[in-house]
């Protein structure tokens, strides 16, 4: 013990010398706890891994994206962008185009479309201008905007499947989610002007917001706002999604029963009604994406291709049976464009049928519908159309080359998983059996929150199946780009939630096993067998 010059004990120096390491130790402990609690949480760690994958795939050379088939020209023009003309139409599909021109003067384009994509593209354009000012739009700035919302959606999804579970097994569940939804066949769409870039995260958010609301994990006002906003943006992506907007509006209106607070109920009523009105307006005023090309394929690559007697099928629609020669043909290979666009073709063929009449026909011919559903499911499991390349032409890859980096799930899905509607039907039945009990219990006990997990999964299923069916009646087996992507995504979302539940169930069973007792039984059995052998 130290003493001062008067012989008194001097403990000040001792105390001060001990304070520093004690405080430092506590600080390190707090930092360690914070890192483990937040940064090393399964959900956060999964997002960090996804962020690293996206940076590697979408932003670093060689930059990867989707080739352009021309279907996004209206949205591009509506965002005051234009094609630089460096690639021919065939090359545009075979190669990814990263740079686009920015219009400096009046936009005289005639095919301008303003959709839910437009604000996101304009935000990316402003970011580009803030950093470069070279009047060239680098698509990676748009991808950066989409990436933020994609990571938010994935965080909600990971929180959904890890809620109330033991940490070591939740890492396995999140790792599975990274493999499925971090698959490059999905994320490569982010570097494109296709609606898939937005529908990818919007569909995830609108389903997970319902499930998380049932878990009472986050604020109800925040979750119901996310549901309505994502539903609104989704239904305004395309006129053909407007019907789904009406259905989601009705669902959202009925979410008022989840929370008894008056302000919450009023929010559900107002937003639900607004979503229905906006969806109906979108159906009326947004451009109809159903062209003669898609109508032609709905007949030749759908109705006629699966009919036992194409002539009889044509007579059902009041079309001359001679048009049966077009069975199985595509729009571009059948006859000359001049003949295809002639008034005779319009009056005697195209005006004789529409999606409603095709749907009625399939209702009376379920065997043909089932055959088409099988082909649609098989096409959807490919995720990426084979004719769209992923690399820039300057990278030197052959035309149409698609990346194989981190494509474990998409490869398994397209090459091994059964691609037929019978498999999907069995899969849906198993999911309903597993989750319907909680839904029924929630209804009986008048606890609406217990019904939301089932409702969230059924919402995904409904959206996917509707898009699958709609693709058949509007495009035959030729729609491998838009609506089939949505079916593939919803299939994977529901599968992931169910597999997560299965993993947790398996872990729960393992925890109940007395491994020491099992070990003793195993070794005792082995000793008995040895003794029996000597006898």
Image (cartoon, rainbow, N blue to C red):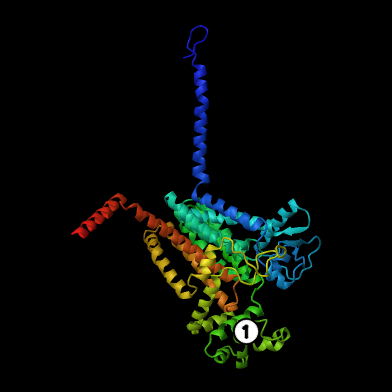
Residue hosting label 1: 329
Q: Position of residue 286 (x, y in %)?
A: 66, 70
Q: Residues within 10 Å of mark 1 (few under 14, many from 20)?
A: some
Q: Farthest residue to the left: give it.
A: 535
Q: How many marks?
A: 1
**Residue 518 higher or lower than 320, as above or below:** above
Residue at point 49% right, 79% down? 370
Q: Position of residue 72 (x, y in %)?
A: 68, 68
The C terminus is located in which quarter? bottom left
What is the quadrant of residue 386 in the picture?
bottom right
Q: Farthest residue to the right: give it.
A: 105
Image check: 102 left or right of 511? Answer: right
**Residue 483 higher or lower than 406, as above or below:** below
What is the quadrant of residue 109 in the picture?
bottom right
Question: Which element carries disc 1, helix, strand or loop?
Answer: loop
Q: Position of residue 402 (x, y in %)?
A: 62, 66
Is residue 346 visible in this depiction of the protein? yes
Image check: 207 left or right of 141? Answer: left
Q: Position of residue 341 (x, y in %)?
A: 71, 84
Residue at point 67% right, 83% down? 333
Is residue 247 visible in this depiction of the protein? no
What is the quadrant of residue 77 in the picture?
bottom right
């Amino acid at each position: 013990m130290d003493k001062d010059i008067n012989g008194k004990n001097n403990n000040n120096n001792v105390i001060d010398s001990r304070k520093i390491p004690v405080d430092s130790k506590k600080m390190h402990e707090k930092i360690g706890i914070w890192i483990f609690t937040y940064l090393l949480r399964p959900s956060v760690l999964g997002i960090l891994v996804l962020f690293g994958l996206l940076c590697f795939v979408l932003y670093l050379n060689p930059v990867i994206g989707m080739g352009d088939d021309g279907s996004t020209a209206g949205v591009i023009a509506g965002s005051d962008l234009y094609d630089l003309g460096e690639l021919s139409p065939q090359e545009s599909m075979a190669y990814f185009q990263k740079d686009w021109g920015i219009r400096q003067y009046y936009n005289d384009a005639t095919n301008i479309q303003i959709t839910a994509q437009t604000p996101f593209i304009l935000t990316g354009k402003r970011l580009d201008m803030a950093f470069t000012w070279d009047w060239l739009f680098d698509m990676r700035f748009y991808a950066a905007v989409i990436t933020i919302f994609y990571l938010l959606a994935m965080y909600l999804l990971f929180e959904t499947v890890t809620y109330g579970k033991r940490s070591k097994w939740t890492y396995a569940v999140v790792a599975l989610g990274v493999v499925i939804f971090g698959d490059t066949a999905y994320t490569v769409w982010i570097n494109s002007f296709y609606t898939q870039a937005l529908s990818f995260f919007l569909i995830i958010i609108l389903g997970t917001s319902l499930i998380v609301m049932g878990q009472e994990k986050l604020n109800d006002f925040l979750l119901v706002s996310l549901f309505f906003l994502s539903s609104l943006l989704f239904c305004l992506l395309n006129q053909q999604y407007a019907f789904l907007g009406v259905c989601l509006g009705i669902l959202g209106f009925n979410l008022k029963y989840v929370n008894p607070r008056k302000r919450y109920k009023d929010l559900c009523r107002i937003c639900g009604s607004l979503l229905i009105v906006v969806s109906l307006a979108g159906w009326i005023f947004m451009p109809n994406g159903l062209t003669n090309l898609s109508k032609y394929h709905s007949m030749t690559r759908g109705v006629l291709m699966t009919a036992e007697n194409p002539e009889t099928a044509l007579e059902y629609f009041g079309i001359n049976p001679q048009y049966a020669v077009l069975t199985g043909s595509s729009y571009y290979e059948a006859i000359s464009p001049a003949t295809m666009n002639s008034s005779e073709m319009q009056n005697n063929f195209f005006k004789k049928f529409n999606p409603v009449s095709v749907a009625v026909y399939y209702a009376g011919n379920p065997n043909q519908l089932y055959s088409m559903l099988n082909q649609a499911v098989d096409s959807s499991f490919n995720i990426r159309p084979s004719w769209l390349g992923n690399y820039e032409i300057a990278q030197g890859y052959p035309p149409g080359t698609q990346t194989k980096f981190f494509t474990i799930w998409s490869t398994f899905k397209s090459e091994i998983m059964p691609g037929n509607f019978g498999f999907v039907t069995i899969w849906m039945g198993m999911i309903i059996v597993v989750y319907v009990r909680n839904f029924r219990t929630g209804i009986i006990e008048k606890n609406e929150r217990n019904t939301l997990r089932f409702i969230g999964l059924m919402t995904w299923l409904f959206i996917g199946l509707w898009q699958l069916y709609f693709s058949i009646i509007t495009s035959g087996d030729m729609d491998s780009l838009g609506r089939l992507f949505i079916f593939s995504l919803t299939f994977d979302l529901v599968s992931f939630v169910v597999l997560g539940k299965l993993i947790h169930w398996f872990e729960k069973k393992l925890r109940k096993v007395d491994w020491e007792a099992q070990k003793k039984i195993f070794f005792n059995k082995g000793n008995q067998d040895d003794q029996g052998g000597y006898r």
